[in-house]
Amino acid sequence: MHQLTLAEIARGLADKKFSSEELTRALLARIHQLDPQINSFISVTDELAISQARAADARRAAGESGALLGAPIGHKDLFCTQGIRTSCASKMLDNFKAPYDATVVSKLAEAGTVTLGKTNMDEFAMGSANESSYYGPVKNPWNFEHVPGGSSGGSAAAVAARLLPAATATDTGGSIRQPAALTSLTGLKPTYGRVSRWGMIAYASSLDQAGPLARTAEDCALLLQGMAGFDAKDSTSIDEPVPDYSASLNASLEGLRIGLPKEYFGAGLDPRIADLVQASVKELEKLGAVVKEISLPNMQHAIPAYYVIAPAEASSNLSRFDGVRFGYRCENPVDLTDLYKRSRGEGFGAEVQRRIMVGAYALSAGYYDAYYLQAQKIRRLIKNDFMAAFNDVDVILGPTTPNLAWKIGAKNNDPVAEYLEDVYTITANLAGLPGLSMPAGFVDGLPVGVQLLAPYFHEGRLLNVAHRYQQVTDWHTRAPNGF
Ligand code: GLN
């Protein structure tokens, strides 16, 4: 049963081939058996899962239907889940049980999903390797010595290992698309404002966006359908109707204009990845797409701009963790200053502390204009580049990552080397655009992803292109050895 996709599960449940409770029990057993090797879960919620599965079975017996009714999923451990530990993979929140559900969690629960657990991640979603978790690194099911990508590495590894058909994730600079690429999954970062951020513990509020991680574009469409929509509780949520994402999956690609940014194929890209990206372009051409070279001239400034803006917002967002209101508090503080200092010093890991310091520095009176304001100007230029490009093309295609999944520990002494891995993904966050990564082959047994970007609110187009591609390729059907 663990090989079933969300779409197959929906059909199996509708045809009464199995119940949600049977499926849920089978997957929970698999998680308990196999996850110790991968470490993709922070919490496994057996009791909640069984009760949600029974409720979903009862709703079906009463005549209800729905693609997600009874579907088992996992939530990245930064979505608040009422009464359940919501840790953000930090010692700071190790003891934090959220008093309410995030909108994403409650919407999916209403649609009938079954929560099997909370997935591991980089601490406070800062990272590209899932090595900074307080609960230990996540291993890539394709090769245990390698990282699964981050920060949604737990969600990705769990789905890749067939412990779950799909999971929620978040993407601030690539954290859905990059782990999707490194574990051979399909992952979608929606347009900023498409999915509510309410109850999602904030990293960088102007960049954070939740989306689905699954094996196929078809499944991403199903999960996104359950997540997307206006939410009055999130002031940046956009009141736009949500289209039927499954309905447009099969649309023809005849005449689709694909832009290949020349900056995406320059120095720094592993040539073996470049070859696989070109092979995916050939497949799409066979389906009727036409290809054109484009330019995104300000791309080179994206990483420095992002690594000012994201830490600046993080330093502000994370100030709420003060040892008083939430989470960890140091032992025997001598006074209030000592309480703040030691609670934060002991509760946050090294990378989180580094970003808070960088962010606070960039926002400080003397440096605000030199760093933060400059970064915001670059952000506008990057957005303008995309707007110009989308006058000529319908989607932009390139590699998701410049390199293959690296060995655990390989970049631990060089944070900037890890930051550079985000080179192709962060521009979409800076501009607020939707992006998708889909499996496009393997090099040395490690997965490679291709990224597609589209204009605002064209998630349906991304899913359509990926789905058509998945009809003529089988990369997305391959499972890691032993899973
Ligand atoms: N790797 C990027 C960072 O560390 C992106 C993380 C994310 O998207 N959450 O900030």
Image (tube, rainbow, N blue to C red):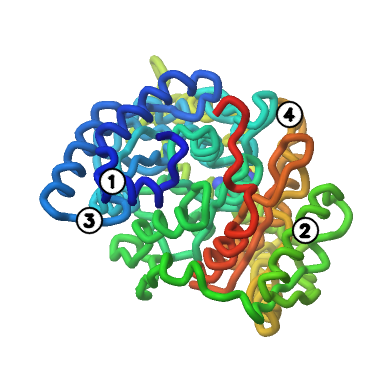
Residue identifier under label 2: 279
Residue identifier under label 1: 13
**Residue at 79% over, 49% down:** 273
> Pointer 1: residues within 10 angstroms few (<14), some, or many (20+)?
many
Secondary structure at numbered mark 2: helix
Does 474 appear above or below 38?
Answer: below
**Disc 3 and disc 2 in contact, CB within 8 angstroms:** no
**Residue at 59% over, 57% down:** 470
Labels 4, 2: front one: 2
Labels 1, 3: front one: 1
Does 294 appear above or below 201?
Answer: below
**Residue at 23% over, 52% down:** 110
Secondary structure at numbered mark 4: loop
Q: Nearer the viewer, residue 107 or 248?
A: 248
Instruction: Check the picture and name the quadrant holding the N terminus.
Output: top left
Labels 1, 4: front one: 1
| Earlier-in-chain disc, 2 versus 1 | 1
Image spot of residue 187 (x, y percent): 54, 52
Secondary structure at numbered mark 3: loop
Tell me, yes or no, if residue 411 can be seen here.
Answer: yes
Identity of the amino acid at label 3?
Ser
Which mark is drawn over residue 407?
4
